Amino acid sequence: MQTEVTKDLPAGEFSLRDASIGVRFAPLVFFCVWALLPLFLMFWGPFDFQLDNPDTLIGFLFACVLAFGLGYTLFAPSTRVEIVRHPRPHPRINAFYVAACVLSALLVEPSIYAYTGKHVWQIDSVLNQREVYLELLSALEQGSPLRKAMSALRGLSAPLILLVLPTAAVYWPDLARRARWSILGVVLCFLLFSLFRGTDKEMGDLLVFFFTGIAIAAGFRSLRGAQIDRKAFVRRAAIGFCVIMVFVTLFTLRKAARMQGALSFCLYNDVACFTVDTGSDFVNFIRFSFGMLSAYLNQGYYGLSVALNTDFNWTYGIGHSSFLVSFFSSFFDSESIYQDGLMYALRAGGWDDRYVWSSAFPWLASDLTFWGVPPFMFLIGAVYSRAWFAAIARRSLSGIMVFALLSIFIVYLPANNQLAQSPDYYVATVVWLAIFVLEGVRNVSRKDFVDHGRNRVVR
């Protein structure tokens, strides 16, 4: 049954201003809501935080949100753009998907063994997620050469493997059958890696990439006047809701397994506690889910409040990334860079970065100072805006990837600087951001932009 109807596009130029406000500013609204939600939970959530500097914390967060919003708004394309009704994806996109699936399959077994000491066929060992997670922590402390080698290989292959996840929903109608099967193969490898490590990161990344692709696909159709059938919209919304509920359920069950069913828990150093027990198992499960999700969201902003009271020591441009700090320390046999950073200084404030989060802002401030973080967020907002419109206007491969990776950055923002914590996401971000910028420079060099007074026309 036909689920959408596409209106005839106007000949020639098409103004992005003709797009609905929702399409133009949906990513900005998402960022503002998500960045301020943990702040709301700190004051009106289940935990009672005792903050030494609430006014400074609120002022800093609103400055970052405002800077991001200004960057997004000022750099959002407002020109008249000639768009293609149905731009074709990259001519080798099917081959990219197959190659990514093959790489994922080749890396999953040695990666699991390097991080856990187990083999992929020992699937029964993942039933006890608490034991799996404790074994992972023990393996990480040992720092084996095999794990470092696999981490490097995963980083080098990440630009291709991560390509599959956010672009699948955007290019799905144009993909060959082998490419669609390859998508499932990559997703399976992600899930296996998550199960054997006992971590939620991989499933969280899949969730973010899934909804990012759905959002780009919806924006792409809306920009071209497609009208979604209400029944189809309700059906897709129901599927999305089910995906979220499955993730939340698995997340809660895994945390309950780690805590061995405890009904009361405190954040690190007992800075705030939460009691779950109400007498009803179902209500306990709901309250535990809400409490755990709240803890994951707002503990990072508590760490940020502690970091705002620390002294700044420059970390030479690498303090924003635990991966870079670890690499530098092992290469030069020195811990001085890490000990100069804000993350190490948090220990003196009773908030140990080895066990709890402090949001992405102290990581960034280690290199930029807290005064330099809002300008950086302005830049992120500008790139996020450009990538969004490149994705929905042209289905630009680099635009989709930059938008998806920055969405990962935003989703994990209250917790940590996710894009810089591991080689795979760091390398993928650098590669795709470079491609995105070079494509923009190439378009300008080819005189694709023609000035007409104050208005620029894209041909």
Image (cartoon, rainbow, N blue to C red):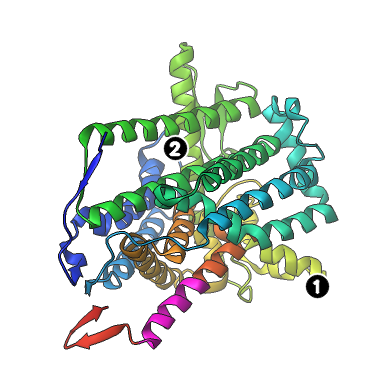
Q: Residue 32 versus residue 121: which sits nearer the camera?
A: 121
Q: Residue 353 versus residue 187: which sits nearer the camera?
A: 187
- Residue 421: tell me if it is visible: no
Residue 362 numbered tag: none
Q: Residue 121 versus residue 99: which sits nearer the camera?
A: 99
Find residue 209 and report its horizontal and vertical position in percent. 47, 48
Residue ID for mark 2: 48
Q: Is 438 located above or below residue 59 in the figure? A: below
Which mark sits nearer the N-terminus, 1 or 2? 2
- Residue 437: tell me if it is visible: yes
Q: Which residues are magenta?
A: 434-446
Badge 1 density bin: few <14, some 14–19, many ≥20, Cα 10 Å: few
**Residue type, label 2:** Asp
Badge 2 density bin: few <14, some 14–19, many ≥20, Cα 10 Å: some
Q: Is 306 located above or below residue 16 in the figure? A: above
Q: Residue 89 versus residue 205: which sits nearer the camera?
A: 89
Q: Is residue 259 magenta?
A: no
Residue ID for mark 1: 332
Find residue 359 and report its horizontal and vertical position in percent. 51, 54
Give the residue at x 74% y 36%: 134
Give the residue at x 19% y 53%: 225
Q: Is residue 445 magenta?
A: yes
Q: In terms of secondary structure, where does tag 1 sit?
A: helix
Q: In terms of secondary structure, where does tag 2 sit?
A: loop
Find residue 446 and report its horizontal and vertical position in percent. 38, 86
**Residue type, label 1:** Phe
